Image: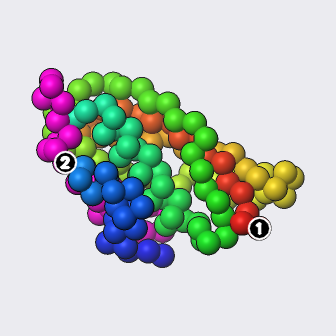
Amino acid sequence: MPTPDVLTQTLTELIPILKYAGFRVTLSEDEHVRTEMPLEPNRNHLGSVYAGSLVAMAEASGGALMMQCLDITQFKVMVRHISIDYHRMALTDVHCDLHLPDDFHDSLMKGLAEEGKAFYRLPVPVYDAEDEGVATAYLEYRLKLNA
């Protein structure tokens, strides 16, 4: 299981803008990750976290969870679709606290056995420093075994 530092380094090397945004993984354990991103340098003209930064954080957080829970040398994991609902302005640093849903592995194995690929929709809530929900992203993944 990769450590938070390894996940942070891997993601920020693969997606350099995440490093500039201050994205980091702070917890990685048993199908659970926590990620954080500071308000600065992600502040927009209204003084809140830029909407695009929230999307990038949610997608990277989902990616961290996939990297932590799957052997990514065996799977191609791609985001097929992203949508996001904004609930309120994020005026502080933000974080995600993700647990792999109970049905993930069964859904993955069923799809791979039946079609050679699987699709999974992962909700990713984003919270401010007071643990108030500021957004919820929905990431639809396509997973396929490497040939």
Residue for point 44% across, 74% down: 2
Discs 2/1, front:
1
Q: Which mark is residue 38?
A: 2
Residue for point 47% across, 51% down: 62
**Is any atom of residue 106 visible in this view?**
no
Quadrant location of residue 145?
A: bottom right
Q: Which mark is residue 61?
A: none
Label 2 with label 1: CB-CB less than 8 Å = no
Looking at the rendering, the stretch of residues picked out in magenta corresponds to: 22-48
The picture places residue 141, in percent across and down from the top left corner, at 61, 46
Q: Which residue is mark 1?
A: 147
**Is any atom of residue 63 visible in this view?**
yes
The picture places residue 61, in percent across and down from the top left corner, at 41, 52
Q: Is residue 124 above or below residue 73?
A: above
Q: Amino acid at mark 2?
A: Pro
Q: Residues within 10 Å of mark 1 (few under 14, many from 20)?
A: few
